Amino acid sequence: MAEIIDGKALAAQVLARTAADVAEMVAGGAPAPGLAVILVGSDPASEVYVGRKIAQCRKAGITSIEHRLAVDTPQEQVLALIDALNADAGVHGILVQLPLPAHIDAALVLDRIEPGKDVDGFHPVNVGRLSTGTGGLVPCTPLGVMLLLDSVIDDYRGLNVVVIGKSNIVGKPVSMLLLEREATVTVTHIETRDLPDVARKADVIVAAAGAPHLVRGYWVKPGAVVIDVGITRVTDFDGKTRIVGDCATHELDHAKAVTPVPGGVGPMTIACLLSNTVLAAKRASVA
Ligand code: GUN
């Protein structure tokens, strides 16, 4: 049987460490780290994610400042809010929940965030820092993926890693982190030919395609490690909805280790958002 990597347990450890860091900062006279969360509109999935992020902040002692804006809020107003948060010394992290409504240019909005407060790691300065290995803030899901991998892999040098999906949020940044650890990284996507054959050569698969049960048992080499970043909500025949990952995990008994969905990457993403906020606050205090 493959080991099931427990993302909830690992996330609890990261959250406990983050809460201890916050307590130490506050005991030393620093203000509690502050995270501003901007949600434009009321996309149901975004509402759930934002609710979870804010609840976890509270538990860790991070001050969360919520900005819920109407779906038809003009772009200029969102930009003006970001300018105000950039200038607010009590705000150490700014997160704009994606997706944004169609009338708002997401790239323009993300570019407006002060890079030192960009706890999502989406600003071009942070993307550049990641790709050159020069610090910056690293996107939360890729950070969480690396911590999950670190729990079962000591040395990445020369390992064949196949990343499925080339998104800016997961595929590209996780590839950079793996390259930094000297893995041999193949980034695949919807146009990749013979994907099952490519995947079968992998020592590690990171599946971030958003395609339910794309990765089947025969795609996975015996002893490989499989990280499932997919979260697709599907409706069953009885009308009930459930979350499905990118991997047919029930066919992966021959893998070394796999992450479950839910309970794998998801909890790690939020834990890493909080650790990024504390990191941003610490860096602001020495700047
Ligand atoms: N929407 C889906 N994933 C994310 C994420 O990691 N950050 C933000 N801001 N929005 C998202």
Image (cartoon, rainbow, N blue to C red):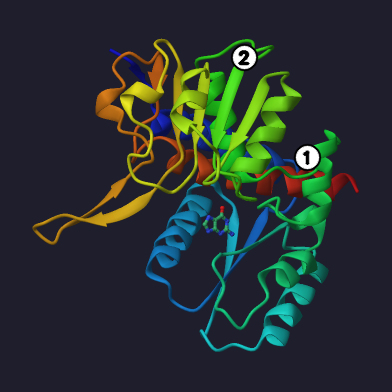
Which residue type carries mark 2? Leu
| Left or right of 278 in this view: 216 | left
The quadrant of the picture occupied by the N terminus is top left
Residue 226 position in % (x across, y down) = 44, 25
Q: Which residue is mark 1?
A: 130
| Left or right of 175 in this view: 2 | left
Residue farthest to the left, as pictured: 238
For the residue carrying disc 2, how many other residues have a C-alpha within 10 Å: few (<14), some (14-19), or many (20+)?
A: some
Where is 252 relative to 45, above or below? above
Where is 252 relative to 71, above or below? above
- In terms of image quarters, where does ligand 1 lie? bottom right
Q: Nearer the viewer, residue 237 or 49?
A: 237
Q: Nearer the viewer, residue 142 or 184?
A: 184
Q: Which residue is mark 2?
A: 159
Residue farthest to the front, as pictured: 193
Q: CA distance from mark 1 to mark 2?
A: 20 Å
Of the image marks 1 and 2, the number of the one nearer the N terminus: 1
Residue 106 position in % (x across, y down) = 66, 70
Residue 283 in view? yes
Residue at 68% of width from left, 75% of height from top? 105
Name the image quarter holding residue 98: bottom right
Residue 257 position in % (x across, y down) = 40, 18
Residue 282 position in % (x across, y down) = 78, 44
Residue at 75% of width from left, 82% of height from top? 80
Q: Secondary structure at mark 2?
A: loop
Residue at 43% of width from left, 55% of height from top? 52
Residue 135 in view? no
Which residue type carries mark 1? Leu
For the residue carrying disc 1, how many other residues have a C-alpha within 10 Å: few (<14), some (14-19), or many (20+)?
A: many
Name the image quarter holding residue 245: top left
**Is the residue at mark 2 in contact range of ligand 1, meaning its CB lies under 8 Å from it?**
no
Name the image quarter holding residue 100: bottom right
